[in-house]
């Protein structure tokens, strides 16, 4: 297990197309989800939930995405529809982070949405700490109501994104990061 500070300093997203199996074991997945639920959550509202896509479930979700894409793009080439069908197929495990808000006199909706984002980041970090590659992605289908309905989200739920998790197929290269002098001010 890497040192926590070193892990946070070096964590990097791994592209799903650069992942393969195996994915996390059942015990590792439980650990990842437990850590995903340990985030700031003012009011103890738990304004998020998780959808697990692995094995055939990734194919079924891809069928939903492809069907909606084909209906909304009737002239799309078959290759484009097939690309949509394979959206969740690269990594062996994909976790959908569902965000919703609950009316509360002291906890605004935005704060609840931030909690869902914190949950997603904790999942990415936990998977990385366990030695897996992880990547938090969205895409048109993450915001399309017909896709969300097809994936079983309720009308008041949104998708904060999909976390793709698997074994990296090659060494991970870092990308340029912002200089602290460009993003930090003092009041």
Image: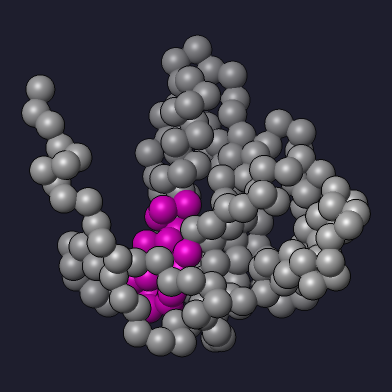
The secondary structure that most of the magenta stretch takes on is helix
Viewer-proximal residue, 32 or 99? 99
Where residue 183 sits: x, y (%)?
19, 40
Q: Is residue 128 magenta?
A: yes
Q: Residue at x 85, y 48 (%)?
A: 72
Where residue 13 sits: x, y (%)?
40, 66
The quadrant in which residue 144 appears is: top right
Left or right, 68 with respect to 29, comes to: right
> Can residue 8 be spotted in the picture?
no
Left or right, 89 with respect to 21, comes to: right
The quadrant in which residue 93 appears is: bottom right
Q: Quadrant of the N terminus?
A: bottom left
Q: Quadrant of the C terminus?
A: top left
Viewer-proximal residue, 71 or 91? 71
The colour mode here is one colour
> Can residue 124 be spotted in the picture?
yes
* Segment colored magenta: 120-135
136 in relation to 158, above or below: below
Q: Residue at x 84, y 60 (%)?
A: 76
Where residue 186 sits: x, y (%)?
9, 28
187 in relation to 62, above or below: above
Viewer-proximal residue, 61 or 44? 61
Q: Residue at x 14, y 46 (%)?
A: 180
Q: Is residue 73 magenta?
A: no
């Amino acid at each position: 297990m890497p040192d926590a500070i070193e892990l946070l300093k070096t964590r990097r997203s791994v592209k799903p197309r650069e992942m393969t199996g195996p994915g996390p074991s059942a015990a590792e997945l439980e650990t990842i989800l437990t850590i995903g639920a340990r985030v700031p959550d003012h009011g103890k509202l738990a304004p998020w939930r998780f959808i697990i896509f692995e094995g055939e479930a990734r194919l079924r979700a891809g069928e939903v995405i492809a069907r909606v894409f084909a209906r909304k793009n009737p002239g799309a080439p078959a290759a484009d529809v097939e690309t949509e069908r394979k959206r969740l197929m690269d990594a062996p495990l994909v976790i959908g982070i569902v965000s919703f808000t609950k009316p509360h006199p002291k906890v605004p909706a935005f704060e609840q949405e931030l909690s869902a984002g914190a949950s997603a980041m904790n999942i990415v970090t936990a998977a990385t700490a366990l030695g897996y590659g992880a990547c938090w992605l969205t895409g048109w289908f993450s915001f399309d109501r017909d896709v969300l309905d097809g994936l079983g989200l309720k009308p008041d739920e949104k998708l904060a994104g999909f976390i793709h998790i698997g074994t990296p197929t090659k060494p991970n290269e870092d990308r340029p990061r912002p200089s602290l002098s460009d993003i930090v001010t003092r009041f």
